[in-house]
Amino acid sequence: MDFPVYIFGIHPHLIFESLAYFIGFRVYLFTRNKERIPMDQALWVIVGAILGAALGSKFLYWFENPKATMENWINLFYLIEGKTIVGGLLGGLIGVETAKKCIGWTRSTGDDFVLPLAVGMMIGRIGCFLTGLDDHTYGTATTWMTGVDFGDGIKRHPTQVYEIGFLALLAFTLLQIKRKNAGWEGLLFQLFMLSYLMFRFFIDFIKPTPHPYWIFNNIQLASLLGILYYIWLINKKQIEKRREIHA
């Protein structure tokens, strides 16, 4: 297989990133809880998510190589070329919470985004895999049977495929929890974020990206902060639930 794998002459990243947004949005419209939030207010939440994700994905990317960012801080092409999923997720979270405050909505809306996010991210990672070395999402060299030669004669961890498999398993698990109506409103999204951030924290140890922050890279530091936040949030919710039971 030659990388990038063009489809009808179109770059795979463009095709699958477009499909990820389109299908992810359609999944959201089809699966969202219509009783949780009216559509007119849900659209504002979506706008907040999109803007927050766009800003967050760029902002975190600038910390991948801080020296290069400082050297190119007036280079517009450098500043807009990269993005990160973790930055997009965390930025999207901030955008959603900001939008909810603006419209005065207090209930959790995160559960509605779990399946659309998982589906969209899996589709997007197909494009990352088919792009090959140009996408910079591959792993380090490996002798594992899963190793893939992306065109330079070196077999590497196909971390994009690992992520697709992880997201599929995570989505299935969370759907089982949803069917049992277990937990509280917002639990599914909290578990999704906690699980994905833990996955990214560990998988980035086998990615050949700069690790300028001791043994960590920018993604791992952001993931660690997110992990600590969601552990605190879930623990807080559990304490509140216990108090309600014994009240």
Image: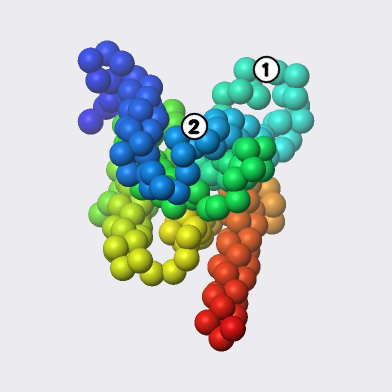
Q: In the visual, does 185 lie left or right of 30?
A: right
Q: In the visual, does 111 lie left or right of 59?
A: left
Identified at 65% across, 24% down, the residue is 79
Residue under numbered circle 1:
76
Residue 177 - label: none
Identified at 28% across, 20% down, the residue is 6
- Relative vertical location of residue 103 with respect to residue 11 in this rendering, above or below: below
- Relative vertical location of residue 114 with respect to residue 47 in this rendering, above or below: below
Question: Is 80 in front, or is 181?
Answer: 181
Q: Position of residue 110 (x, y in %)?
A: 49, 50
Q: Position of residue 24 (x, y in %)?
A: 36, 36
Identified at 38% across, 44% down, the residue is 34
- For the question of whether residue 102 can be seen, the reply is yes
Residue at the farthest bottom position: 246
- First in sequence: mark 2 or mark 1? 2
Secondary structure, mark 1, is helix
Q: Position of residue 226 (x, y in %)?
A: 60, 56
Q: Position of residue 186 (x, y in %)?
A: 49, 58
In the rendered view of the protein, which quadrant contains the N terminus? top left
In the rendered view of the protein, which quadrant contains the C terminus? bottom right
- Relative vertical location of residue 132 with respect to residue 193 in this rendering, above or below: above
Kind of residue sitting beneath label 2 = Asp
Residue under numbered circle 2:
40
Q: Quadrant of residue 22?
A: top left
Kind of residue sitting beneath label 1 = Leu
C-alpha gap between disc 2 and disc 1: 35 Å
Contact, mark 2 vs mark 1 (Cβ under 8 Å): no
Secondary structure, mark 2, is helix
For marks 2 and 1, give the one nearer the viewer.
2
